[in-house]
Image (cartoon, rainbow, N blue to C red):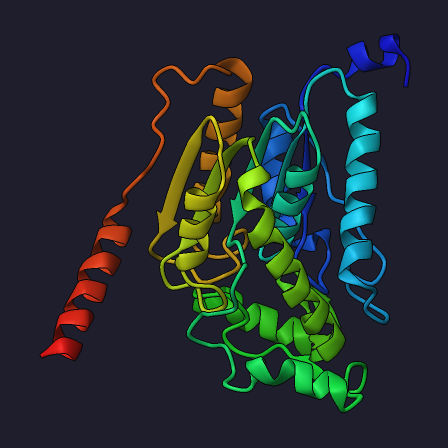
């Protein structure tokens, strides 16, 4: 792309990574809101990471993502921002730890540890399943609540999943090999979070059934962003780009991007949001700890 072409598209580019064994459908609503606010959006797919086919290695996911982002960086007049949901957020953080010049990272429902309330007890046994040769034979089927708290949306997703293999909340299944490689990406990203020096927005649901709020706190504590904003939601589950508070997610993301592109030094930037939902969560957590100790 030459200088003339770059000047034709001066608006910033936001690169969004979908979750593991899923598709860009997860960002349909968010992308429409970003585009309406003047941003351009690119949602990459990665063979063996996106839904369909056999899982590739986690290193390939990261190498492919880095390659795509580097190419786009070279073509853009302005620095790019990254974002993602679930393991896509983890992937975006991993890319940001490797590349210079990433302007910001939007980490939605970040999954560094699969420690939510709906996770099956046998998840720690994944390595043993791989040793037994079950990597491509065993497929974890998505089930209620599908990452959705809203009962009407959940019923709609369930209906789609009964006939189609892909929906706005991801694929209908995930192989054991996908989960195994995903765990490796999580460990790599945790180790490299201190290398992330881009501005960061985290948005996480208090009641996330896949990855609890420890994940968002880890991003906040281990990265080194010049600007940090943390949002906690009280009426959603894991798929916050589809659930009850999708409008809030879009509005907060647009506000964050507007700030970092128009106010790079961060004057008057509110770094951390302690929402009523987070306060409720912390009070309940403290109460549970006290009752355990009594």
Query: Position of 4 compared to 30: left or right?
Result: right
Return the residue nearer the eye: 135 or 37: 135
Query: Position of 75 compared to 278: left or right?
Result: right
Q: Position of residue 216 (x, y in %)?
A: 44, 51
Return the residue nearer the eye: 189 or 141: 189
Q: Position of residue 50 (x, y in %)?
A: 77, 60
Q: Residue furthest left?
A: 294
Q: What residue is at 49 percent from the left and 34 percent from the top?
A: 224
Q: Position of residue 115 (x, y in %)?
A: 46, 70
Query: Position of 26 compared to 221: left or right?
Result: right
Q: Residue furthest bottom?
A: 132
Camera sees residue 283: yes
Q: How many numbered badges does the structure rendering display? A: 0
Q: What residue is at 81 percent from the left and 48 percent from the top?
A: 63
Quadrant placement of the C terminus: bottom left
Quadrant placement of the N terminus: top right
Q: What residue is at 61 percent from the left and 29 percent from the top?
A: 36
Camera sees residue 138: no
Q: Position of residue 160 (x, y in %)?
A: 67, 71
Return the residue nearer the eye: 266 or 174: 266
- Vertical side of 278 occupied by 162: above or below: below
Q: What residue is at 67 percent from the left and 25 percent from the top?
A: 101
């Amino acid at each position: 792309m030459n200088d003339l072409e770059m000047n034709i598209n001066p608006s910033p580019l936001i690169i969004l990574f979908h979750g593991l064994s899923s598709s860009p459908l997860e960002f349909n609503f968010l992308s429409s809101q970003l585009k309406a606010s003047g941003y351009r959006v690119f949602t990459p797919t990665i063979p063996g990471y996106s839904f369909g086919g056999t899982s590739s290695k986690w290193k390939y996911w990261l190498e492919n993502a880095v390659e795509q982002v580097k190419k786009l960086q070279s073509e853009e007049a302005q620095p790019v921002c990254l974002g993602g949901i679930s393991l896509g957020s983890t992937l975006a953080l991993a890319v940001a730890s490797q590349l210079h010049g990433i302007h910001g990272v939007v980490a939605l429902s970040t999954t560094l540890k699969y420690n939510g309330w709906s996770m099956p007890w046998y998840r720690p046994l994944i390595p043993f399943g791989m040793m037994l040769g079950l990597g491509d034979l065993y497929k974890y089927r998505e089930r209620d609540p599908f990452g959705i708290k809203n009962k009407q949306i959940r019923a709609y997703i369930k209906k789609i999943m009964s006939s189609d293999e892909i929906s706005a909340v991801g694929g209908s299944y995930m192989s054991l090999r996908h989960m195994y490689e995903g765990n490796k990406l999580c460990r790599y990203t945790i180790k490299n979070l201190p290398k992330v020096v881009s501005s960061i927005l985290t948005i996480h649901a208090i009641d996330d059934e896949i990855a609890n709020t420890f994940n968002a706190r880890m991003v906040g504590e281990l990265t080194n962003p010049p600007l940090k904003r943390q949002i906690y939601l009280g009426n959603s589950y894991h798929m916050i780009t589809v659930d009850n508070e999708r409008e809030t997610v879009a509005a907060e993301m647009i506000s964050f991007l507007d700030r970092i592109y128009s106010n790079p030094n961060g004057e008057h930037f509110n770094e951390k949001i302690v929402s009523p939902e987070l306060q409720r969560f912390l009070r309940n957590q403290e109460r549970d700890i006290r009752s355990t100790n009594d």
